[in-house]
Image (cartoon, rainbow, N blue to C red):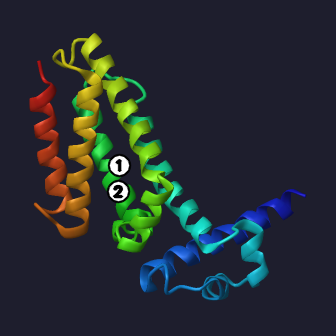
Amino acid sequence: MNSIIKKSEATKMRIIRSAGKLFQQKGFEATSVREIVEDAGCAKGTFYLYFETKVDLLIFLANTIFKNFYEIISRELSFISNDPFAQIDNLFSEMIEHMQDSGLSLSFIHTNEILGIITEQKLDNHFMNNITDKISWYLNEGIEKGYFRHLDANLYGKIVFSISHQLFESSALYEYPADVGTVSKELSIIIRKIFEK
């Protein structure tokens, strides 16, 4: 039984990887279920064991991307060390590394057809709320322990997320205002200036 479950999970992962690759190469609308299963090396019926539609598969992919970023943020901001700014620097490094290693580029998520589905399904709202809650908690902890100046942690959690999200996205997609490594270093300095006592 255990080997059957492993084989089933391996098949599902092949379908997901093939879909991600083909969506990036051809676009979501231009990629058929037939092409996905051919690339994954399985029968068309197998696709429907895991996903009802191609949109369901896309939603799964988007949720996986959001979940992975949330897990990185949650892991790095689940406690506060005696050097909270080093934690923030480490968080940025991990996020950059994940973006480079994930296999799904940010450009995939930011096509009009994909963004439309994500917005329609309200997938990004849940993701943003969870992340801003985590950042706000971290800021509250830093304020209580005397690392950060007194401020409205909920408001600044949203501000920091919005600024960071926009800058990382823009630098990763367009190298604007600079490459992602440079933006990360400068953003770290900005965050220090905002929160230092």
Q: Is residue 166 above or below residue 112?
A: above
Residue type at tag 2: Glu
Q: Percent from the top left, x then y, of residue 174?
A: 19, 69
- Picture quadrant of residue 182: bottom left
Q: Where 88 sits versus 195, above or below?
A: below
Q: Position of residue 60 (x, y in %)?
A: 58, 60
Label 1 SS: helix
Q: Which is nearer the eye, 18 or 116?
A: 116
The residue depicted at 61 percent of the width and 82 percent of the height is: 36
In-image side of 137 versus 148 (left or right):
right
Question: In the image, what residue occupies the spot 41% across and 66% down?
Answer: 116
Q: State the residue in front, 96 or 138.
A: 138
Q: Image check: 85 left or right of 33?
A: left
Q: Quadrant of residue 16?
A: bottom right
Residue 22 in percent (x, y) is at 50, 82
Q: Is residue 118 left or right of residue 18?
A: left
Residue 34 versus residue 47 in the image, above or below: below
Q: Residues within 10 Å of mark 2 (few under 14, many from 20)?
A: few
Q: Dividing the image into 4 quarters, which one contains the C terminus?
A: top left
- In what quadrant of the picture does the N terminus appear? bottom right
Real-space CA distance between mark 1 and mark 2, rounded to the nearest whole angstrom: 5 Å
Q: Amino acid at mark 1?
A: Glu
C-beta proximity under 8 Å, tags 1 and 2: yes
Q: Which mark is residue 4?
A: none
**Helix, strand or loop under label 2:** helix
- Give the labeled residue for mark 2: 97
- The disc placed on residue 94 is 1
Residue at the (35%, 64%) spot, across then down: 100
Q: Does 82 sit left or right of 53 as displayed?
A: left
